Amino acid sequence: MAATIMEGVLHAFEIVKEERIAAPMEIVFETILEQMGPLNSTPEKPMPMVLEAWPGGRWYRDLGNDSGHFWGHVQAIKAPALLEISGPLFMSDPAVSNLQYRLTEEDGETVMRFRHRAMGWVGEQERGVDAGWSQLIGRIVSAVAERVRK
Amino acid sequence: MTRRSHSADVFSAIAEPRRREVVAVLADGQEYAVNEIVLRMKMAQPAVSKHLNALRKAGVVTVVKRGQHRMYRLEALALKPVHDWVRGFERYWTHQVDQIKQRAEQKALERLIRIDKDKQ
């Protein structure tokens, strides 16, 4: 048996999004539950999930015949202001995430604040993700390409 | 049992928001002297130097001496682990948030139309 002690491999990130929505909080909250549940999708295809909307409820993909993929548990829920989930999400790594949707009403609109914080050990090769991330990285990649051309 | 060490932790190095600003200044791929970065960031020179040093230790920037100046340049490859990890999630959540906004606004509109019809 071989064992390796890994040092300094814990990584962390935070994704924050804020959106003003022209709809009452109740409707936005109901929509979040639908969107995280049966209407969940990726940019490419529908990917229905089960979201048990109560404390400790599971958030998972039900693939039938006792197959599936567990993404997280409802850590806190307070309709129509808060949905908080913690769990591994779709990372097949020793990593954990905390997601929060917080809603407030401002000037007759709903402000939805979304936060995803993750930490863990994520290998550097496993992730076959395929699209642009942020302006910053986009600029870096272009700058590097430009430098290569020179 | 073997012991593997990762001395250059890119994630920790760019966890500090001002360091990400330094990265943004260097993102055009050009070399910059410390005083040029200080001017662009409107930040005290010792603080900029401290951030540059942390980024250099993580391999995010490299430094070369040109005459009187120490020139800093971004090493984009060092940012790849961060890029790879985050972009899958970023893309998924952007889609999700867009869908929530679109559907909630549509529902609110439909509800208003229904209330209007009921009044008539």
Image (cartoon, coloured by chain):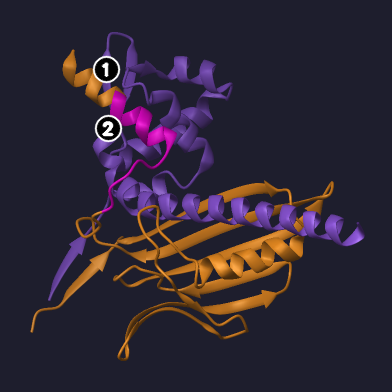
Among the two numbered marks 2 and 1 on one chain, the one whose residue lies closer to the N terminus: 1
Is A88 rendered above or below residue A122? below
Q: In terms of depth relative to the viewer, which is nearer, A37 or A18?
A: A37
What's the residue at 54%, 54% (across, down)? B99
Q: Amino acid at mark 2?
A: Glu
Residue A132: percent from the left, percent from the top? 35, 40
Q: Colour of chain B?
A: purple
Give the label on residue B10, or none.
none
Residue B79: percent from the left, percent from the top? 31, 41
Image quarter in which the N terminus of chain A is found? bottom left
Residue A40: percent from the left, percent from the top? 47, 65
Chain of the residue where label 2 is placed in the rendered structure: B
**Name of the residue lying farthest toward the front:** B120
- Which region shows up in magenta? A129-142
> Which image quadrant is residue A99 in?
bottom right
What's the residue at 37%, 17% (across, down)? B32
In the image, residue A30 lies in the stretch drawn in magenta:
no
Neighbor class of circle 2 (other Cα within 10 Å; few <14, some 14-19, many 20+) is many
**Name of the residue lying farthest toward the top:** B67
Disc 2 vs disc 1: Cβ atoms closer than 8 Å?
no
> Which image quadrant is residue B53 in?
top left
**Secondary structure under badge 2?**
loop
Image quarter in which the C terminus of chain A is found? top left
Residue carrying label 1: B65
Q: In terms of depth relative to the viewer, which is nearer, A25 or B38?
A: A25
Q: Colour of chain A?
A: orange
